[in-house]
Image: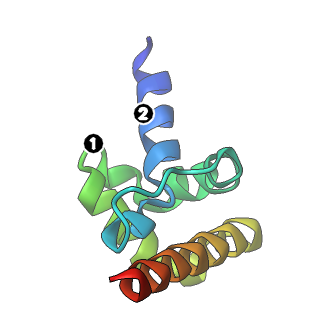
Amino acid sequence: MTRYHTIASLLAFTATAFTLQTSPGLAFSPEAQQMCSGDAMRLCSNEIPDIPRITACMVRNRSQVSPGCRAVMDREHAAAAAARKREAAAQ
């Protein structure tokens, strides 16, 4: 795998990694990878390969991400919050 493919894969994976901060078991959707990869490359490429720093960068720069990425981030954040709420209610 070329360095570019490795970086692109890493960024695609971490573009919505902010959800992991609250729900470690949550998987990234293909939609999130597609919608946020460009934003991660544009806004956070200097944080590679540090996944926690890329995650923090995306959260910090949320106001600058594309509308599509922001919508996915919002949806996945809401899903993670709902999962936490269900988990807390089950205890």
Q: Position of residue 36 (x, y in %)?
A: 62, 56
Viewer-proximal residue, 16 or 48? 16
Please identify the quadrant where the N terminus is shown.
Answer: top left
Residue type marked 2: Ile
Q: Is residue 91 above or below residue 33?
A: below
On screen, residue 73 versus residue 60, left or right, reads right
What residue is shown with label 1? 49
Question: Is 35 left, or right, of 78 in this rendering?
Answer: right
| Residue type, label 1 | Pro
Q: How is the image coloured?
A: rainbow
Vertical relation: 83 (above or below) 17: below
Marked residue nearer the N-terminal end (1 or 2): 2
As measured in the structure, the alpha-carbon distance from the residue carrying label 1 to the one carrying label 2 is 8 Å
The residue located at (26%, 61%) in the rendering is 53
The quadrant holding residue 78 is: bottom right
The residue labelled by disc 2 is 7
Tell me where residue 2 appears, x and y as whole percent.
44, 14
Picture coordinates of residue 29, whole percent (x, y): 62, 50
Dots 1 and 2: beta carbons under 8 Å? yes
The quadrant in which residue 59 appears is: bottom left
Quadrant of the drawing holding the C terminus: bottom left
Say which of 21 and 12 sits in front.
Answer: 21
The one of 30 and 34 positioned closer to us in this rendering: 30
Of residues 13 and 11, the one nearer the viewer is 13
The residue at the point 76 percent across, 67 percent down is 68
